[in-house]
Image: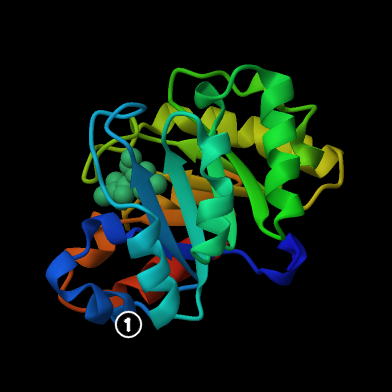
Amino acid sequence: MTSSSFNAPIISPSILAADFVRLGEEVQSVSNADWIHVDIMDGHFVPNLSFGPDITAVVDGITDQVLDVHLMIEEPEKWVETYAKAGADCIIFHVEAVEDEQAALDLAQKIRDLGVRAGFSIKPNTPIEPWLDKLSHFDLALVMSVEPGFGGQKFMPEMLDKVRKLRAAIDEQQLETIIEIDGGISAETIRESAEAGCDAFVAGSAIFKKDDKAAEVDNLRQLATL
Ligand code: DX5
Ligand code: ZN
């Protein structure tokens, strides 16, 4: 698959906010979403633990949706094959978790060689500028609009400056790199994120805390359609 096979806006519900006891039903309740966002936390890169490749494989087994796997882990290079085997369609690693810029480019290539879309993510305090001339190596750029580690936090609107810089660079270089935003996305914040240039929107609590989750996916998609 190439990034051009997707049409913005892409809504990617984060199952971190789902009821894990009913995970199968929860995933099915958002079958109208474009992607499913899978947050992997190791208790080291971020101060929280979530789930790993086994749960990722279970989710892959119950849906045909694109699995958007967000690795918030140290040493991501040791894990990408495992997550590719578990069914990831897109693997996103944090640039703060790799040695240097060259290591990030090498890891992106390794992910692409596995037949998986390669993404990088940056935490709120990490500047985007060093990555603007390296976007052709990536299928996706994920801007964190909260500190990674927990769902349900408040959106940081100042992160949209990074989105605007990414949008300008991607358009100028005529790339198809997808811009995704993650953290605090809701009916209140999705429109301004779309206007700043985002293509894909992760939403955890905004979707899974609603009674009618499918309706909220449609609502968010409509709000993000410019
Ligand atoms: C945070 C995760 C997010 C989280 C988003 O570290 O990367 O994907 O699940 O949750 P909400 O949408 O509730 O902010
Ligand atoms: Zn995430």
Please tell me which residue is depicted at 68% across the width and 25% down the height of the picture.
Answer: 103
Q: Tell which of 48 and 154 is nearer to you.
A: 48
List x then y, in percent, for residue 47. 24, 28
Q: Is residue 1 visible?
A: yes
Confirm or reject: label 1 Cβ below 8 Å from ligand 1: no
Q: Please determine whether, in this image, residue 63 is positioned above or below residue 141.
A: below
Q: Position of residue 79 (x, y in %)?
A: 51, 44
How did the renderer colour the structure? rainbow
Q: Quadrant of the N terminus?
A: bottom right
Please report the residue visible at 42 percent of the width from the left and 79 percent of the height from the top.
Answer: 61
Residue 183 visible in the snapshot: no
For disc 1, the marked residue is 28
User: Which residue is depicted at the point 78% across and 39% down?
Assistant: 137
Residue 207, quarter of the rendered image = bottom left
Q: Is residue 69 above or below residue 172?
A: below
For the residue carrying disc 1, how many other residues have a C-alpha within 10 Å: few (<14), some (14-19), or many (20+)? some
Count the marks: how many?
A: 1
* Of the pair 197 and 29, the residue shown nearer to us: 29
User: The C terminus appears in which quarter of the rendering?
Assistant: bottom right
User: Residue 197 appears at what percent x and percent y?
Assistant: 61, 46
Amino acid at the residue labelled 1: Gln
From the viewer's perspective, tell me whether residue 22 is left or right of residue 9: left
Q: Is residue 122 above or below residue 213?
A: above
Residue 23 in picture, x, y percent from top left? 23, 72
Residue at image location 32% in from the left, 58% down from the top: 187
- Please name whichever residue, 23 or 204, is drawn nearer the observer in this view of the structure: 23
Disc 1 on helix, strand or loop?
helix
Q: In the figure, residue 28 lies in which quadrant?
A: bottom left
The residue lying furthest to the right in this view is: 173
State left or right for residue 116 relative to residue 209: right
